[in-house]
Amino acid sequence: MEIRLMRTDDYGPVRGLWLSCAGMGLNDRDDSEAGISAFLARNPETCFVAEDGGKIVGAILCGNDGRRAFIYHTAVSPLCRKRGIGRALVGAVEDALVRLGISKAALVVFSRNEAGNAFWEKLGFTERTDLSYRNKAFVELRRIDT
């Protein structure tokens, strides 16, 4: 298995991976090819894929504002889990963030995603119960929940 930086031409296989993983929350705009290409252009050093035998079996997106980072859309193929792929992807992100001088990362996991919450807890990401997560869409977004 190889961990490498994500490229825009990885979009098709990565989107297919996301759709194969229960518990993902996508939308038709931000997670479109144009949306992910824009994200990769802004965050060229912190988004990775895992390849096994030339096939993408894992992916992670991470962006930052120069002081804090946010992790998005971490996924490992259901057929390839329990092999350390997710841990390796998170490790690649953490190493990149340290190189960039970023001291903290956050993420959101649906509360119904038991496997995802257990994974992040195991890696030392603690649940914040003192916060309320809020968002506001400026355009109409069509949700795609897996």
Image (cartoon, helix red, strand yellow):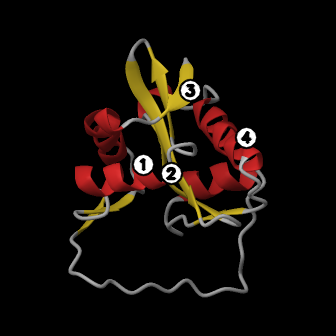
Residue at disc 4, secondary structure:
helix
- Residue type indicated by callout 3: Ile
Q: Residue sitting at 67 percent across and 85 percent down?
A: 131
Sequence-wise first label, 4 or 2: 2
Give the percent coordinates (x, y) of residue 13: 30, 33
Residue at 47% over, 39% down: 59
* 37 over 14 or under it: above or below: below
Tell me how far mark 3 sits from mark 4, CA to CA: 12 Å
In the image, taking residue 27 as reference, residue 52 lies left or right, namely: right
Foreground mark, 2 or 3, reads 2
User: In 3D space, how far apart are the residues under numbered discs 2 and 3 (Cα atoms)?
Assistant: 16 Å
Q: Mark 1 or mark 4: name the one nearer the start of the chain.
A: 1
Judging by the rendered image, the residue that carries numbered circle 2 is 43
Q: Mark 1 or 3, which is nearer the eye?
A: 1
Coordinates of residue 85 in the picture (x, y in percent): 59, 30
Q: Is residue 32 visible?
A: no
Q: Are marks 3 and 4 in contact (CB under 8 Å)?
A: no
Residue 95: assigned label? 4
Which mark identifies residue 40? 1
Residue hosting label 3: 3
- Answer whether labels 1 and 2 touch (C-beta < 8 Å): yes
Across and down, in percent, residue 45 comes to 57, 42
Proximity of marks 1 and 4: CB atoms separated by less than 8 Å? no
